[in-house]
Structure formats: C-alpha cells, structure tokens
Image (cartoon, rainbow, N blue to C red):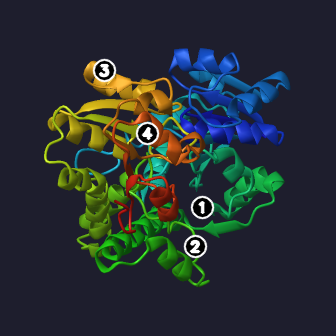
Amino acid sequence: MKITITGTGYVGLVTGVCLSDVGHQITCYDIDQEKINLLNSGKSPIYEPGLDELIQKNIQKGRLQFTSDVKEAYSGADCMFIAVGTPPNEDGSANLTYIENAAIEIAEHMTKDCIVVTKSTVPVGTNQHIGRIIQERLPANLKVRIVSNPEFLREGSAIHDTFHGDRIVIGSDDEEAGKKIEEIYSPFKLPVVHTDLRSAEMIKYASNSFLALKISFINEIANLCEKVGGNIEQVATGVGLDKRIGNKFLQAGIGFGGSCFPKDINALNHLANEYDYDFKILKSVIDVNRLQKERLFHKAKEIFESLAGRKITILGLTFKPNTDDIRDAASLKLIQDLLLEDAVITVYDPVGMPKVEKLFSDKIQYAASAEKALAGSEAAFILTEWDEIKTLSLETFKCYMEKPILFDGRNCYTLEDAEKHGIHYYSIGRKAVV
C-alpha cells in the first residue's frame, strides 16, 4: 500500500522504516527540512541500533522516501499515519496541537478516499476529535475513516519490538477500515486485537501505567528491604517466578524516565480528574518515582558531611541504555542536586553527553571514557546500565578513584564482588558494603 507517515520522530520513523522493509511504499513527511535532508542521506536523527542500516536499505530499494512537501506527502496516499508528538502541558494533559495541525493538513491535501491512523499516544476521545476536524474541511467527494493504532515500542529495541511485538492493537468504529490496517501489518504475523476507538486509546495508557506501577512497587519493596535486611534481587526472583506476576519490570533501581511513562501517567491522571475520578494508585506511582530518583543523592548526603568541592563522577546519563534520550532521566535531577551542593561533577555516557551539555554547558565536566571520568573521584554514581559501564571491573573503580565509594542505581555488581575488592558499595534494596 502507499502509506504516508506524518512525523519523523521516534515512533513515526521506526514505523515507516519497518513498514517499508516488508514491502509497503512509504513516504515520511516532516516540516523540519534539516531532518529530512539528513534522512534522505541515509542517516537517522535519533540513536536507535540498526535503524540507519534499514533506512539505507529501503531507500536503495525505492520503497522509502522523505519529504517536507505537504502536497507530495499526501497526494495519492491510501493510508496516512499520524505520529507527531503529544508533549505534556504544564497541568499534565497532552498537548494536541501537532495532532490537530496534522489533521487539518490531511483534510486540505488528501486526493482520494483514505484511512487516517493515529500512532501518537492520545487521550481517550482524540480520534473522534480528529475525525471531526477532517470531516469539517474535507471536499464533499472524498471519504475518510479513522483508526487508532497505538505503539508499544521500547527505545533501544524498537526495531525488534516492531517485528516481534506481543500484539497489534487496532481500534476503529468502522470494521472494514480495521481490517485494512490489519492487512498492512499481516507480514509481521503478530496477534491482532480489534477494539473500538476509545478502548484502543485507553489500552496504551493502561499498559504504560501498569508497567510504571510495577516498577514503583518493586522499588518500594527494595526500600523496605534495606530497612529490614532483605535482598531485593532474591525477593524479585521469588516474586517473578509466580506466573501471575512474571519477572519483567521487577528490577529495582532509581525510577523510570524517558518520553513515555512519565508523560502517559500524568496524562491519564489528568484525564481521570476531568471525569472527576480520583485515581489514587496512579498518584502514588508519580510520587514514588519522584522520590526514588533522589535516593542515591540522599545516601551520599548521609555519608559525606559535605559534598561541597568533592569530585563526583556520574556514569550513564540517558534514561536507559541503547538510546540518546535524556528526557526525565535520573541523571538530570542528580546533577541539579549536586550542583546546589557545590560538588565538582564529571560525567560520562556513550551517546548522551551532547544533549546533557546543551542543558548544563560548562557547569560540569565531560569525560571521553569511564576511566577518565573516574580519575581522582571521591564518589561515583552509576545511573544507566550501558554494557560498557556495567561490565567495568570493580578493580577499575579502585584503581582510578581517590576513594572507591560507589553508588549503584542499577545493581550492576554483586555484594560479594564489592566486598572482595574493598569497595564502599551502596546499591538499591540491598545492604551496604562498607
């Protein structure tokens, strides 16, 4: 099918590239000409393993193109996917400006009957709102049908998730339109769930909120383990073997970040407030995650009389490995807190430093390697479990640091190893090694 993807952000780009790889004719449209030029050269503006290779492959095969020309983008398209951002407003609600602008452009430039598919994460009722915007501006001789098709991609493994996902959700109040979208995805051979429009919208918010709840719950158990003398890793293993619970998202740490969980939780909470529903569990998840990001900082404050002038190393800046995304990352809060204490901060991350430098400029120092970041340090924090960080030998910390004091927000090492190497080691949900 001839498909247009509106928006070349994370979701739109990965979706468009993967659909082209299974044989569809894809045009990705974005108003950012600089981004379009980069994509047409075969390079992705976002860091995602394997994406550059897929872009180059499908450009060469003639199945994938990128444009900033709105007429070229929408002319003759059988299906149009909206994958623009829905950033949070100050009150936590989703900003639908980009969605609404996309709907207007589609109505003004579509040249044949088509299906409009929303990939963006949107509040319940948004797809019907999009339908009304298009219908009000649509020429009388054209027909449009609306489908909700939420994404469930994880940054760092988005290509794998597209081809090997758990399910594809297709929400529509038009049965034929839903089946057409199922045909588009048929090469993936994944389970398909058909729902009405509003249920599909709710599935995305419910899924992300439940996963965030699971993370916050295990972090609360970890905090209690520290007080009662339990080991969170042993507890999580025992809990996760229960098939009703499962072992995923039971890794204790310093909370979640990124572009999805925080935004979606706040948007769902705002939606609940609009309908006068007090979503108590969701509010607790928000509070728990906010406090969890500060746990390592408070541990450091307890150990050191003062952090002023102390040389502190932070290893890992992105909210998770295999992405350059620093949105709502724990590193940002820790850097801010340490700067208020007048600490001397050196950071290292394989790909995240350029974005952090835009925020903090010369207020902190940027190292070319983990070893250089650790040189002369009095304390180190591990915030992102990149392979090259979590596989560092504990001897490295002992060798390069002035004082081998390690705060591990991702439980990368065993307590036995820390004790064997003579490291002062503070992790999450486990006893301290001193």
Q: Is residue 382 visible?
A: yes
Residue 172 is marked as: 1
Q: Which residue is drawn at 29% across and 19% down?
A: 362
Q: Which residue is drawn at 61% across and 21% down?
A: 71
Residue that numbered label 2 is attached to: 247
10 Å crowding of disc 2: few (<14), some (14-19), many (20+): some
Amino acid carrying mark 3 in the image = Ser
Q: In which quarter of the image is the C terminus?
A: bottom left
Q: In this view, does 170 lie to the left or right of 23?
A: left
Find the distance from the CA under tag 4 to the CA under tag 3. Answer: 17 Å
Query: Of residues 209 and 324, which is closer to you in this image?
Result: 324
Q: Residue at x 29, y 64 (%)?
A: 288
Residue 315 is marked as: 4
Residue 351 is marked as: none
Q: In which quarter of the image is the N terminus?
A: top right
Badge 1 marks a residue whose secondary structure is loop
Above or below for 42 versus 182: above
List x then y, in percent, for residue 374.
41, 33
Amino acid carrying mark 1 in the image = Ser
10 Å crowding of disc 3: few (<14), some (14-19), many (20+): few
Above or below for 238 versus 327: below
Badge 4 marks a residue whose secondary structure is strand
Q: Is residue 103 left or right of residue 41?
A: left
Badge 3 marks a residue whose secondary structure is helix
Query: Of residues 336 and 80, which is closer to you in this image?
Result: 336
* Mark 2 or mark 1, whichever is nearer to me: 2
Q: Residue at x 62, y 26 (%)?
A: 44
Q: Which of marks 2 and 4 is nearer the N terminus?
A: 2
Residue 361 is marked as: 3
Kindly indicate whether the residue at mark 1 contacts the one at mark 2 (C-beta within 8 angstroms).
Answer: no
